[in-house]
Image (spheres, helix red, strand yellow):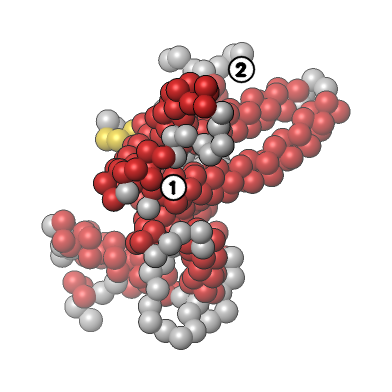
Amino acid sequence: GPLSERRLMDVRLGELPAWLATCDFSPQGLLGGVQKAWSSYYDKYINVKRGGPAGISLLLAGYCLLSYGWNYQHIKCYRWRKYH
Amino acid sequence: MNLSFFDQFTSPCLLGIPLILLSMLFPALLLPTSNNRWITNRLLTLQLWLFNLITKQLMLPLNNKGHKWAMILTSLMLLLLTINLLGLLPYTFTPTTQLSMNMALAFPLWLATLLTGLRNQPSMSLGHLLPEGTPTPLIPALILIETTSLFIRPLALGVRLTANLTAGHLLIQLISTATFTLLPIMPAVSILTTSILLLLTILEVAVAIIQAYVFVLLLSLYLQENI
């Protein structure tokens, strides 16, 4: 279909800048994008008939990684310390 | 760079933008809203079971007027439970280790219970300042003591939660530092400290759950006296 209507996973790597140009970067557009991403994750991994711990664990692991990234500027000094 | 053991409690900041709001809003992602299905997914079923358990436990001792507090007490309990348990994951930030947040939760809710009692049944609420059956000479002293204990309640609520969680996190950091440092030097002692660390982690999970429960239970007790 046309480039602006395709989802991120269906866009080829070479077409990525063109697809980004058609994106809606207003606050409502970003919020809608976040909402769509969350609902697609929720419907695929958590809102299933026989879900397991995998759906939530992936969320928690992502949260840990995100927190590590947020704290990296602070944590890198610990690596360089001589005495702990 | 002043690296100390208390650095884990600094408010997270990315390029000057405070991220504490994000760490307070993240638990909302883990608690999905219920759709009107008869059979829901497993996460939602577990969550509804937990809500029912908490609400029943909290609302049993309260009369009908107290049941208006059901939503705020249950949601407070869920918030504290998820925030405390999420703080046990590596590298995460626990907002309830900040005294400002706990006082902001404890003080208005305690004041609300106090004002509800003073407004609707002032003599009953003031009557709680004197326990039944006290000997007459002791009455003035006891009233002073009970008033002090009344005013110390919000402080105690906030500081209890802060202190428990901060102490637990600090202990975990100290013992894990000891384990890592001892590993190249004395592996046997390092294994001992690892077992202590495992037991401590189990304790911390329990403390996280219990502290959330105690906070909300005490608030419901203060409500019981005043409503």
Tag 2 subunit: A
- Could you tell me how far apart the alpha carbons at marks 1 and 2 are, in whole angstroms? 51 Å
Residue B182 lies, with reference to residue B61, above or below; the image says above
In the displayed structure image, the side of residue B196 where residue A42 appears, left or right: left
Q: Farthest residue in the front direction?
A: B136
Give the residue number, with chain letter if any, for mark 1: B225
The residue sitting at 38% across, 34% down in the picture is B103
Residue A20, picture quadrant = bottom left
Quadrant containing the N terminus of chain B is top left
Q: Farthest residue in the right direction?
A: B188
Q: Nearer the viewer, residue B38 or B136?
A: B136
Q: Nearer the viewer, mark 1 or mark 2?
A: 1
Tag 1 subunit: B
**Residue B176, visible in the rendered structure:** yes
Give the residue number, with chain letter if any, for mark 2: A84
Given contact means CB atoms under 8 Å apart, are the residues at marks 1 and 2 in contact? no
In the displayed structure image, the side of residue B172 where residue B108 appears, left or right: left
Residue B4 lies, with reference to residue B26, above or below; the image says above
Residue type at tag 1: Glu
